[in-house]
Image (cartoon, rainbow, N blue to C red):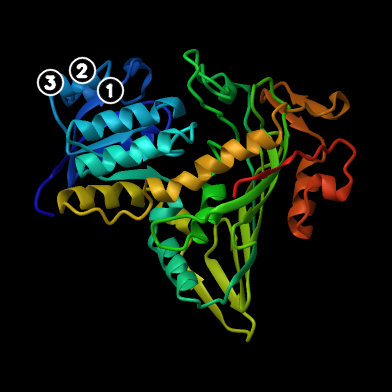
Amino acid sequence: MPKKVSIVLVGMNGYGSVYLKELLSNNEHAYITGVVDIYPNRSVYYDCLVENDIPIYESLQDFYVHSKADLAIISTPIHLHKEQSCYAMLHGSNVLCEKPASGNPRDIQEMMDTRDRTGKFLAIGFNWSFTPAVQQLKRDILDGAFGKPKRLKSIVLWPRDEDYYNRSSWAGKKYSPNGDMIFDSVANNATSHHLHHLLYLLGPTLDTSCQLKDVTSELYRANKIETFDTCAVRLHTKDEVEILYFASHAVYKVYQPHYELEFERATISYKDGGPIVAHFDDGSTKKYDDPENNKLAKLQICIEATANQHHHILCGIEAASTHVYSIKAIHESVPDIPDFPDNLMMFDQHHKLHWIDDLDKILLNGYEEWKLPSDMNIEWSKRGKKIELI
């Protein structure tokens, strides 16, 4: 690399701490020139920053008054992504913005326009999309190695306790106090990678995701939030490929991400902790590395692209935009999100966890059978409206 890349990190708590840990311990090609956070002393790395004389600012505006950065990492609440990403690009920085790109589809065009006007890149931090394994898999899909796609599905069940929803003022909220769209949910935050992943793999080029035709949702909640902690969603692409996506925080046991992709000549499967495996109809197989083994590939790619002044990042705003549109459609499908029935509500006081009895079994059965809960006539299920997108 021709030079060390200067980085401003915006948001040092939450996922920002993952970036801090990596940059403070492995900074051969980059260094932190400043950190922006309104509550910096909440971070376990606060003392380390002070000891290393790394400046801390209350706002991004204040940072750019006093300094500059080759790369800005935006790791802040969803409703701040557009404003801060655009501000950083306008002040000379490339941007790696954490997922999702925004809670508001109307932000997408402004983010694209600002990128094009400034000549900077705008990467969106969906971990898997930056990994060599997923990039090779997508190239093989585009090259027709498996034939045409038929249907795809994914499931991930991650328990989240009351502390998770109390960690910030925006967790589980639809709107900020200023009216900005957040729509923080299981599908727009913790498991958003796995919805985006399916959309991205079906994109017509390496740097785009597919275009959606329609979305039908089932949304539920066990926690006292404005959005949902459980979803079962059926999507169709404009090419009539069916996508099923199941996710929940209202379960007692962890079920790590699984997905299955059916193509004309092969079925591709993934189980957490193992490789991606393509099983061809002739009995042969092809394996790709587990993308979980390289979750910070996005950071290294953005540092390298910045140092070498190129924009070959692939998961930019175009690739991330379909996820933003899908979240809007998911909420439009079920505008009034129902609570689970009281008789199914369980609470583990020790772990402060709200969960639903047998929900994991129901969602796993739906995953195996390619059915939403309403398809299986589950008593509490409520199918939302089909939202037509094209």
- For the residue marked with disc 1, what is the amino acid? Val
Relative depth, front residue between 109 and 272 = 109
* Position of residue 313 measured from the top left corner of the image (x, y, whole percent): 31, 53
Quadrant of res 175: top right
Sequence-wise, the earlier of marks 1 and 2 is: 1
Q: Is residue 372 left or right of residue 312?
A: right
Which element type, helix, strand or loop, lies under badge 2?
helix
The circle on residue 66 is: 3
For marks 1 and 2, give the CA distance.
9 Å
Residue 190: % across, % down = 54, 38
Residue 173, position in %: x, y? Answer: 57, 22
Residue 282 rendering spot, x and y as whole percentages = 63, 86
Residue most toward the front? 390
- Of labels 1 and 3, earlier in sequence is 1
Residue at screen point 34% across, 45% down: 123
Foreground pick, 344 / 130: 130
Q: Of residues 273 and 87, which is closer to you in this image?
A: 87
Q: Nearer the viewer, residue 390 or 234?
A: 390
Mark 2 = which residue?
62
What separation in Å lies between label 1 and label 3 (alpha carbons)? 12 Å
Which quarter of the figure is the N terminus placed in? bottom left
The relative height of residue 381 versus residue 315 in the rendered view (above or below) is above
Three-letter code, disc 2: Asp
Q: Is residue 169 visible?
A: yes
Q: Tell me which residue sits at (18%, 30%) in the image.
A: 91
Dot 3 and dot 2 residues touching (CB under 8 Å): yes
Verify CB contact (< 8 Å) between mark 1 and mark 2.
Answer: yes
Q: Residue at x 40, y 49 (%)?
A: 318
- Residue sitting farthest toward the top: 177
Q: How crowded is mark 1: few (under 14 residues within 10 Å), some or many (20 or more)?
A: many
